[in-house]
Image (cartoon, helix red, strand yellow):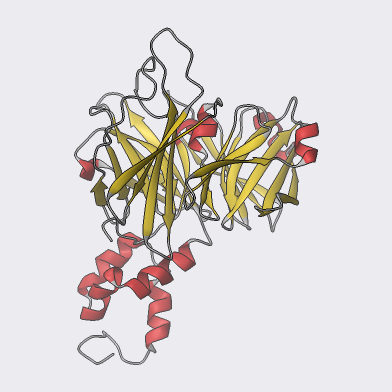
Amino acid sequence: MNSSDSPSGFLPDDVVLQILARLPIKSLFRFKSVCKLWRRLPSEKHFIDLYFQISAKDPTLLIEIPDSVHLSSHLVSIDRFREVTTLSLHFLNDRVKIRASCNGLLCCASVRNRGVYYVCNPMTREVRALPRTRERPFTRCQPEYEATLVGLAFDPFAWRFHVVLAGFHRHFGYRPQDQLVCQVFDSRNNAWSRSVSCLYEEFTHMNRSQVVFSSNSLHWLTHSCTYVLAFDLKGGVWGKIWLPDEVLLSRNGSRIYLLELDGLVSVVQISGVWMSVWVLRDHGTEQWSLVDRVHLRCINGYTASVFPICQSRDVIFMATQKKVLMYDRNGKMWKEIHGVRGASTYPLWFLSYAFKSSLFPCHH
């Protein structure tokens, strides 16, 4: 680093990079005019990887706030330090709804144009429109004409993403066929592939929204809450991962959710006033381990209406109708970090997603 590249020469390059990698992305872009080095950094691979390594340790909660007047929505990003950042998807020039989130990228479906999907980074405002598939609508008797399952898998090491659309063909007035049609988009070759499996399952809204990418597979919790349905991106096959025996024996009367924890598949069970967190240690042997057990007495009034959205080894974000709560695992304390006022069309948990700030491009 020479004097023309750096605003000051008394700090080592590594220290400068570590400082910049901890800044919010908006501040990082604002400081691009300081010097040539800082202008280049947000587009250099080594810095993009470093930024993600640091930000991945502190995932944020992303909430989509619909605006019924303007038929649009804006995004609110909340971190564990109560820092609230307002984002927008207006750069897509389309009315969309978020279908999946993975490692800083979002997969959005167009509301106006059926079958049109985008993958974007809301922090850098970069977008990639996916080519249309030739598949007929999956659920013809549903108004959105969309796939039952939409998954986004972004590998931060290979800078490669896949979009998975899976659903059951259903003619009007008939039950769905017992064939799961799956289409996979590969960002590397910019093309879709198709497969059909003899499988039928049902999913709630939360099951569809809480998709986890881990071990090169996408995971969804089924409506029966007995197993996790996993799609192997490499082999293109579906598999079942049974939940822990303790969860299966006590699932009646409890609520079960699928989250990610440090890159691993995690199951959160809320039963009475207790919340148990399990982690899948090994896909091959389906080995689960109990990593946390939290008493909900401090939020007793919200126990029946609180939903876990995302977590890290330090915190758990949970959403209710109009509030966002955070549990500090180290201090064993609950905090209210965000709330909305007035009438709301949807509860906050209905449009909340796990999110990680990143500088990853969509066109690599």
Q: Residue at x 46, y 63 (%)?
A: 55
Residue 113 vs residue 323, the one in the foreground: 113
Q: Can residue 139 be seen in this view?
A: yes
The picture places residue 146, in percent across and down from the top left corner, at 36, 27
Q: Residue at x 47, y 50 (%)?
A: 233
Q: In which quarter of the image is the C terminus?
A: bottom left
The picture places residue 321, in percent across and down from the top left corner, at 53, 29
The picture places residue 64, in percent across and down from the top left corner, at 39, 37
Residue 273 vs residue 115, the one in the foreground: 115
Q: Residue at x 61, y 33 (%)?
A: 306
Q: Is residue 322 visible?
A: no
Q: In which quarter of the image is residue 97?
A: top left
Residue 263 vs residue 306, the one in the foreground: 263
Residue 50 vs residue 335, the one in the foreground: 50
Q: In this view, does 332 lie to the left or right of 212?
A: right
Q: How many labels does the image show?
A: 0
Residue 68 position (above or below residue 76)? above
The picture places residue 59, in percent across and down from the top left corner, at 50, 55
Q: Which residue is drawn at 21% across and 45% down?
A: 91
Q: Quadrant of the N terminus?
A: bottom left
Q: Quadrant of residue 195?
A: top left
